[in-house]
Image (cartoon, rainbow, N blue to C red):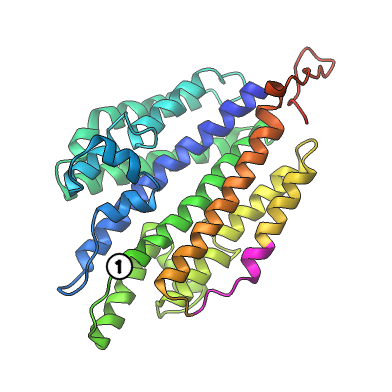
Amino acid sequence: MLARAAENLYWMARYLERVENTARLINSTTHVLLDLPLGATFGWENLVEIAGLDNLFEQNYPEADEQAIMRFLIEDTRNPSSILSCVQYARENTRTLREVLPAEMWERINSLYLYVRDNATIACRSRRERYMVLNSIIEQRHAIVGLVSGTMAHDMAYQIIKLGRNLERADMTTRIIDLNSAVQYPQDGALHETLMERVWMGTLNSLSAYQTYRRLVSMRVDNNGVVAFLLHDMRFPRSVEHSLSEMESCFKLLPKSQQLQQLTAQLRHKTAQHITDNLDALALHEYLDLLQADLGEIHNALTQNYFHAYQDGLPPVDNGQGEIEFAQQ
């Protein structure tokens, strides 16, 4: 496989996962705001901070109100991580990959792009319309994942797609958890407990995890249980540890991936050993920041190992079949 084609596959998968997770992050924030009583504080500006886009937002918008932030996250093409931008990038990458993807893949992604393009402005008008549009985006994204998993050969190209999807998923799961660290709860003890339960229920719902959590963990929702579940539970496919495990299995099937296997295994082990019970909001936020940095390190190593090594003057490697394999360090 050409290194450039592999890079396009990887980013196509990341962009599509980011589309779904941004929709989930927005819905989660909306649920948090709907549940907040008097005495609790949480602002829309926290959403762009958690997404790591606060500097870019400030360059383009004078005020951080709900409407401006929704435009920025959903339809603003000046934001490369907006839903519309990500779908557009995924569509362009898919256009060059038709020979390695299922025939219907282009049609599904193009259809998603047309839907987002036509409905992005509508989604910014009201919370009701936004909820409906974002849910439709999530459903269409699920159809694409099902198409890939159910019809694509589980070859090297498929492993690259899985890598991109799971790295992006792990990162965004940490950001959705981090959303709750920005909530300032009222001092009333009884109200604090009730509100905290509602907020963490919203977090689980935003990841389609509420029923699974109640079945596998507990009928009672609390911060310790939810954080442990979303970080550590291998039975839930959106947990950080499960995503890392999937990445590790992909690396084992790719050439010259010893360093990447080691990095991923170390992070999975470190995550499994870290005790998250009774962390206050600041400590949890700092830990999640470290997790995101470690995931970024894996991304950088993967990019250098497979996609950008040729930039250092390394010659291409002909596999004897007229194709150039991944450039290797």
On screen, residue 81 above or below 118? below
Foreground: 12 or 265? 265
Magenta span = 269-277
Q: Residue at x 17, y 48 (%)?
A: 65
Q: Is residue 221 left or right of residue 272?
A: left
- Residue 273 lies in the magenta stretch: yes
Q: Residue at x 36, y 65 (%)?
A: 180
On screen, residue 171 above or below 11? below
Q: Secondary structure at mark 1?
A: loop
User: To which residue does mark 1 refer?
Assistant: 183
Counting from the top left corner in percent of width and height, residue 117 is at 28, 28
Q: Is residue 168 visible?
A: yes
Q: Residue at x 81, y 16 (%)?
A: 318
Q: Is residue 73 visible?
A: no
Counting from the top left corner in percent of width and height, residue 197 is at 33, 76
* Residue 329 falls in image quadrant: top right
Total marks shown come to 1
Name the amino acid, label 1.
Val
Q: Residue at x 63, y 22 (%)?
A: 4
